Amino acid sequence: MQVLTYLQHPWHWAVAGVLIGLTVPLLLILDNKTFGISSSLRHICAACIPANISFFKYDWKKESWNLFFIAGILIGGFIANSLLHDSANIQVAAATQERLATYGIRDYSALLPADIHLFTLKGLVFFVFGGFLVGFGTRYAGGCTSGHAIMGLSNLQWPSLVATICFMAGGFFSANLIVPYLFKWLS
């Protein structure tokens, strides 16, 4: 029972950073595999859509280990949410709470604030339109942040450095200029 109690406490972010960082050499040492999440969607589509689409014509079975990796993430998320979930409200820094209050977000009882509903205009813009833009950017950049920033940079790939810089610049720009404007516009 002490282990469960220990697992329920917040961990320092560096623990996850080190563990994620160790997966890169582990995958390379085990079987020269590369890490990435966004390519898994392509593998799933290639496996499920037998259409004559050239983008999905490749040997997706060689990358099937990646699908097990994604399944592990889903199972781990389910276990974390059902067994390791702390019943107390999510802890948010006071400065962040103050800033989020200006956007109308005051509920921290769940990871998704109850102040943003999926079936509202605000939810549609942030989740559907925002998700589409993230997907488009990932496809346009040839990979997502995990693929470029974790795997690509560790392999000293120049395109991954450019993509990571662009991801970070886009994130800072969006969080500080676009998102505040959207919250005001959608209120």
Image: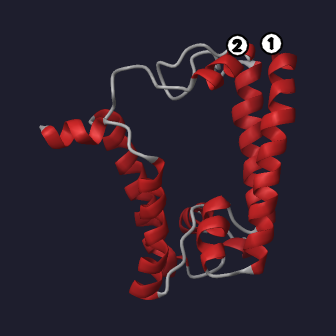
Q: Nearer the viewer, residue 134 or 177?
A: 177
Whether residue 8 sits left or right of residue 109 in the image: it is: left
Residue 59 at x, y percent in the picture: 56, 82
Residue at (80, 31) in percent of width and height: 179
| Badge 1 vs badge 2, beta-carbon distance below 8 Å | yes
Vertical comparison of 167 with 24: above or below: above
Disc 1, SS? loop
Residue at (43, 20) in percent of width and height: 89
Query: Which quadrant of the rendered structure holds the C terminus?
Result: top right
Give the alpha-carbon distance from disc 1 to disc 2, as whole Å.
8 Å
Vertical comparison of 134 with 84: above or below: below
Colouring of the image: secondary structure
Residue beneath disc 1: 187
Q: Categorize mark 2 by other alpha carbons within 10 Å: few (<14), some (14-19), many (20+).
A: few
Disc 2, SS? loop
State which quadrant residue 3 falls in: top left
Q: Nearer the viewer, residue 111 or 156?
A: 156
Residue 120 at x, y percent in the picture: 71, 18
The amino acid type of the residue labelled 1 equals Ser
Q: Nearer the viewer, residue 141 or 90?
A: 90
Vertical comparison of 71 with 35: above or below: above
State which quadrant residue 41 falls in: bottom right
Residue beneath disc 2: 104
Query: Which quadrant of the rendered structure holds the N terminus?
Result: top left
Vertical comparison of 182 with 130: above or below: above
Q: Categorize mark 1 by other alpha carbons within 10 Å: few (<14), some (14-19), many (20+).
A: few
The amino acid type of the residue labelled 2 equals Gly
